Image (cartoon, grey):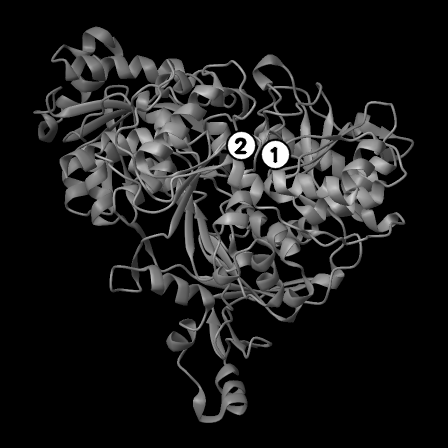
Amino acid sequence: MMKLYEGGAYLLNGSEIVTDNQDAPAVLKKRLGDRVPSKEEAAKNTIAYSILKNHNTSGSMEKLKIKFDKLTSHDITFVGIIQTARASGLEKFPVPYVLTNCHNSLCAVGGTINEDDHMFGLTCAKKYGGVYVPPHQAVIHQYAREMLACGGGMILGSDSHTRYGALGTMAMGEGGPELVKQLLGQTYDINMPGVVGIYLTGKPVPGVGPQDIALAIIGAVFSNGYVNNKVMEFVGPGVENLSADFRIGVDVMTTETTCLSSIWKTDSRVKEFYEIHGRSGDYKELNPGDVAYYDGMVEVDLSAVKPMIAMPFHPSNTYTIEELNENLMDILDDVEKRAAVSLDGAVDFTLKNKVRNGRLYVDQGIIAGCAGGGFENICDAADILKNKFIGSDEFTLSVYPASTPIYMELAKNGRLASLIQSGAIVKTAFCGPCFGAGDTPANNAFSIRHSTRNFPNREGSKLQSGQIASVALMDARSIAATAANKGYLTAATDIDAEFGKPKYFFDSSIYENRVFDSKGVADPSVEIKFGPNIKDWPAMCELPENLMLKVVSEIHDPVTTTDELIPSGETSSYRSNPLGLAEFTLSRKDPAYVGLAKEVQKAEKAREAGECMGDVLPELREAMHTVKAVEKFSDVCGKNTGVGSTIFAVKPGDGSAREQAASCQKVLGGWANIANSYATKRYRSNLINWGMLPFLIDEGELPFKNKDYLFIPGIRAAVQNKETEVPAYVVKDGALKEFTLRLGEMTDDERQIILDGCLINYNRVK
C-alpha cells in the first residue's frame, strides 16, 4: 500500500522511478543514453521548482523571496492582519485579497459580537480594494478553489489548510504577519524547500474516499518527519484515476503531514473543473520534466488502501477500520495511553464504554468543511443513506456543504432530500466543527468526522470544566455507512451502495449576487466600522541589550499543538481583542501560565517606566543581585536588561497557522520560546514576526525548570552579529549555571524584526 524511499529518487517520463543509489548512474544511462542530467539539473524539473522560480524575486533559487498572486483570510484572522498592516502604513491591497466569514459565522455573543468583525471586513474590502464573502456562503478554501486557484499560481492564506495543489496552484498557510508582509510589498523568505514525490498507482475501490487516502499517507509520514517543511508533489499514473474533487480531498489534508505545500500534475479532469466553474483560461497543464529528481519518494498503491480511521487525538493515529474492529480493545487501550499524555490526566478518558456487543458505538457523525464538504463526498454519502435511516437513539449526523453553490446543486439533484429523509441535518457552509465551535458533543461522547483535525478540544469540550469528548477522523462514505447502521462503526466497503456520480453544475450567480468584489479598486473615503471590542495591538519595545527570562511553563509532550498554546473554539470570540484573547493562553494546557506571565510583565512595565523592578517583583531583585555579583556582569541593570517570560516545549507549533499562538504570549510579556525543535515553519515564523526569540536547546535533561530565571547577556548584539549560539545562565540559589541556546538560521529581515521588537515596529522604522 505504501513505500517510503530511504533517499532521493529520479522520475523518468512521469512513470518510472529510479532510486538514487550506486546503481542509478548505470540505469539512467541505459534509459537515457547521453541525455543524463546532473542531479542538480534534474531537481529543476519538478513542478514545484518551476512555480517557485516564477514567483521568486531574489535572483537566487537557494534563498527565495516569494511574492504571491493572491491572499486569503477568514474571520478569525483578517481583523488582526489588517490592523497590523494599517499600523504599518497600509493604503491599498496590492494583490487580490479575499476575506471570508466561515469561522465566526454564527454571529453569536461572546468576547466580540461576530457580526462586528464581519462589518469591519466588509468596510476594509471597500476601503482597500478587496473581496468580501458573507457568512454561510462558502468556507475559505472552497471559495478559493472555485474562484481563485489558477494553474501555476501561488496563494498565501492565513489558515493552515491553504492547499490548492490539486488544481495546479501552490498554496501555503501561514500566520497573519506573513500576509501583512505581502500587503506591504514585502516577500515570503525561505530557503529552497526539498520536494518529495508522491507517486500514485492504481485506483481506489468503491467506498474508499479521499480521506482514506490522506489518512494512510499521514500515518506513514508524520511521525518520522519525512515531508516536514517540504513540498509534496503528486505524480504517477494513479493521478488520472482520481476526479478533481477526489484530489482536492486528499490535497487539503497534506497540511497534517507538516509539509510546506503541495502541487499535483494536472490533466483533462482538472481542465474540466475550471470549465465547470467558468474559468477555463485559468487551467494550465503541469507535469514534471522528462527526468525529475526528488529528495524523497512515497509510493502509494491506491487500490490497496482500505477505509481508514484516525483515532484520538491526532490525524496520524491511524488504523484501517477493519484493523480497529478486529483488535478493538487493544487499540482502545492504546488510545487511552495516548490520551493520558495529551490530556495530562486532567480528566478520565475511555472509549471502552462505547463497545456494545463487541462493536464500537459512535455518538455523532459530521461531514463538513474544506475536507468533507465537497460535492462528491456528500453525493456518495447520500447514495449510501438513500432509503436508510440513522435511527432515534443517541447517534446524530450533520452535513455541511462547503459552499452555497454545492448546497444548491445537492438540492437540484435530489441528494439533499435523501440526506434529510435519513435523519441527517444539513447546514450551511461553516468551519465550526473543525475547530470546536459547532456540533459540540455531550460529555464522554465520541464523534466521527470528515474534517481536518481531531486534536483535543477540536470538538468543543472543556477540560478545565471537566468535560471531555473526542473525535476520530473518517471519510464521508464510512461515516454514512456508520449512520446507516445507526451509529455502529462500519466501513463503507462493508455496505451495499450504488454510487450515482452525478455531474456537477456550478451557478456563479450565487456569488455575483452576494459577494462584494471591489475588482481591485480601493475607495479611501470609506470609513472602517469598528466594533467596541476591536482593539489595537499594545505597544511593544525593542529587544534590550540583555534579557532576564522567567520560565513560566514547561511542557514535555512529544508535540504541542497551536490549539494547546491558544485554544480554538469559543475563545476565538476574543480574536479581535489582543489582551482579551491573551487571557486564554495555555488555559487548557497550563492554567497557571497567564498569572505567572503577567506577574513578570508587571516588572517589565515598571522597568520601561523607569521604576524599580524589584519593588514590583521582589524575587527578581535577588536574581539581579546574583547576576551582578559576577564581575563581567556588574553593569547589568534595568536600563540595559529587559525582563520577560518564556516557555519550554519539546516540539511546539503543530497544527493551525493562527498567529495568536505567538502573539498572545508576546502581549503577556513573552520574549522567547525554548524548544528541542519546532513542529512547523509557520509557528517559528509567527514567533519571529512577533519579536520573540525562537531558541533551540539540545534534547536531554533540561538545565532549568519551571519558574527558574534565565539570564541571557548580550542577546541584542548576538542577534545583530548573526550568532547562531548564545550563552545563557540559570540564576538559582545565588549562583549562575551556564548552558547554550541556539537561534538557528534567520534572514537579515527576521533578525531586524526581532531587534525592533515585532513586525509592526519593523515596518514603522522602515
Q: Position of residue 480 (x, y in %)?
A: 79, 40
From the image, which quarter does the C terminus lie in?
Answer: top left
Q: Can residue 436 be seen here?
A: yes
| In this picture, residue 177 sits left or right of residue 305 | left
Q: Position of residue 85 (x, y in %)?
A: 28, 34
Name the residue at 10% across, 31% down.
632
**Left or right position of 544 against 649:** left
Q: Is residue 666 above or below residue 144?
A: above
The amino acid marked with disc number 2 is Cys
Q: Residue at x 63, y 27 (%)?
A: 459
Residue 617: give x, y in percent of width and height: 25, 10
In the image shown, does 765 or 20 lie closer to the viewer? 765
Identity of the residue drawn at 35% across and 33% down: 126
Quadrant (top left/top right/bottom left/bottom right) for the N terminus:
bottom right
Three-letter residue code for mark 1: Ala
Tell me the residue that label 1 is attached to.
Answer: 429
Residue placed most toward the observer, 51 or 305: 51
Res 692 seen here: no
Left or right placement of residue 602 versus residue 18 in this view: left
The residue pinned by badge 2 equals 102
- CB-based contact (under 8 Å), mark 1 and mark 2: yes
Residue 434 at x, y = what percent?
Answer: 59, 33
